[in-house]
Image (tube, rainbow, N blue to C red):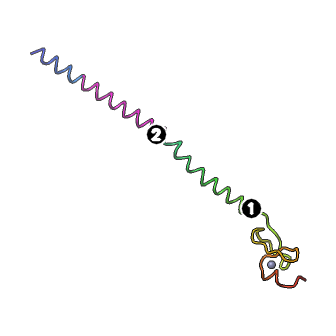
Amino acid sequence: MSRIIFWLALVFLVIFAIRSKIREAQKRHQQQFRQQQPPQQPAPSPSPQARSRSQAANDAEVMLQCAHCGIFYPASETVQANGRDYCSAAHAALPSA
Ligand SMILES: [Zn+2]
């Protein structure tokens, strides 16, 4: 009878040891997963910031002053006429003062 109890206790101990090892492996796997995740999550986040920075750089492009009305406008929207820069084709068509 004592042998049966001994074997039962041994089996329980083995099962408990295996379960604890499985839990440790799962915890390690989750920790590795969590450690691998943070570098992946910040990676996409800097890109919008870089995009906003690049957009800010694009927004801060060269500004030109209209030869007719005097307003400042982006150089990409310039209308050149008679060697002068205008904000619009309408102002470029008007006779310069
Ligand atoms: Zn103008």
Q: Is residue 11 above or below residue 66?
A: above
Residue that carries the numbered disc 1 in the rendered image: 60
Q: Residue at x 48, y 37 (%)?
A: 35
Q: Secondary structure at mark 1?
A: loop
Q: Quadrant of residue 71?
A: bottom right
Check if residue 19 falls in the magenta segment: yes
What secondary structure is the stretch in magenta mostly built from?
A: helix
The mark found on residue 34 in the picture is: 2
Q: Nearer the viewer, residue 79 or 47?
A: 79
Numbered disc 2: secondary structure: helix
- The N terminus appears in which quarter of the rendering? top left
Which residue appears at 82% of the width and 76% of the height?
86
Query: Is 49 or 81 nearer to us in this picture?
Result: 81
**Where 5 falls versus 94 (above or below)?**
above
Say what amino acid the circle numbered 1 marks: Ala
Question: Which stretch did the figure color magenta?
Answer: 14-36
Query: For the point 29% across and 29% down, which residue is it?
Result: 19
Q: Residue furthest left?
A: 1
